[in-house]
Image (cartoon, rainbow, N blue to C red):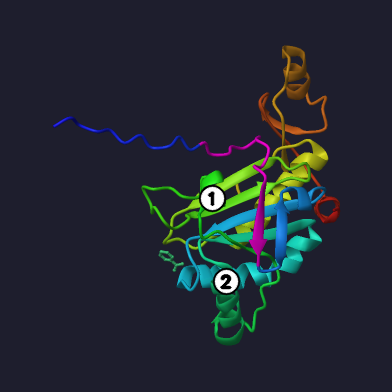
Amino acid sequence: MEEVTVQEPVVSMPRIGDKAPSFKAITTQGDINFPEDYSGRWVILFSHPADFTPVCSSEFITFASMEDQFKEAGCDLVGLSIDGLYSHIAWLRTIKEKLSYNGHTNVEVNFPLIEDITMNIAKQYGMIQPGEDTTKAVRAVFFIDPKGMIRTIIYYPLSLGRNFDELYRVLQALKTADEFGVATPADWRPGDDVIVGPAGSCGAAKDRMDGKEDMTCQDWFFCSKKMDKDKVLKAIAKK
Ligand code: BEZ
């Protein structure tokens, strides 16, 4: 018998530096037009495998308890879970009425949770990764800037709950890089030294090593400078 090859559809995943793919969606806070409704602000789009699951519930409680902190940094949150609207409503009500996590109780989720029972949006954003699961989204996090561009993507598997302090640190670092034209080294937090980009010419490299620039260089390509914590926090707080 002739062998039939089934061609998998080509799924293109958005990448850092791409414009965030647009979609319209029904959410627990009404209809949204993404990312256009968030133009001029940062927005984090994050996915969950399914409603009424324990790791997701712990994540929802944690993210919802930090929503004001993100909002004050000019960043809105938008969740997506592979379930329907009524399931979402019931799950969020259960979270508020019955669940607590890490000392957070009675938590109301005020950010929109997208209904995506068809998985169309999840597929558009590469959140369905068949090697992990064909019907549940992995835990994806997309940081989208005020111009609608994707600036960071982080994926976690189903079994691993996200670190939301790290997500906040990423937002702080992205805003700092934009505001001051610097880069941020490993484990950077506001108040730590920032990295100055590599010297672009032999002359600039020499000037740096001769101590002519306002920076500390261990070698011509490895230079950092102090950045006042309050100055950074003030810039991050800017919408
Ligand atoms: C959870 O959120 O608990 C979960 C969801 C899907 C697979 C495994 C765990």
Q: Position of residue 13 (x, y in %)?
A: 53, 39
Q: Position of residue 235 (x, y in %)?
A: 84, 50
In this view, the residue in front, 122 or 223, is 122
Q: Quadrant of the N terminus?
A: top left
**Picture residue at 20% right of the left edge, 31% below the top:** 3
Task: Return the residue at label 2.
Answer: 88
Numbered range of the magenta stretch: 12-27
Q: Earlier in the sequence, mark 2 or mark 1?
A: 2
Give the left or right position of residue 134, taking residue 76 as reference.
left
Element on which disc 1 rests: helix
The answer, for residue 185, to whether it is visible in the render is no
145 vs 182: above or below: below
Give the left or right position of residue 236, taking residue 114 as reference.
right
Whether 26 is among the magenta residues is yes
Task: Please state which amino acid type lies under the numbered disc 2.
Answer: His
Give the left or right position of residue 97, taking residue 207 as reference.
left
Give the left or right position of residue 37, taking residue 24 as reference.
right
Task: Please state which amino acid type lies under the numbered disc 1.
Answer: Asn
The furthest residue to the left = 1
- Count of residue discs: 2
For the residues carrying marks 2 and 1, which lies nearer the camera in this image?
Answer: 1
Where on the picture, by quarter, is residue 164? bottom right
Task: Return the residue at label 1.
Answer: 120
**Picture residue at 76% right of the left edge, 46% below the top:** 175
Give ligand 1's quarter of the image: bottom left
In this view, the residue in front, 5 or 186, is 5
**Picture residue at 73% right of the left edge, 58% below the top:** 76
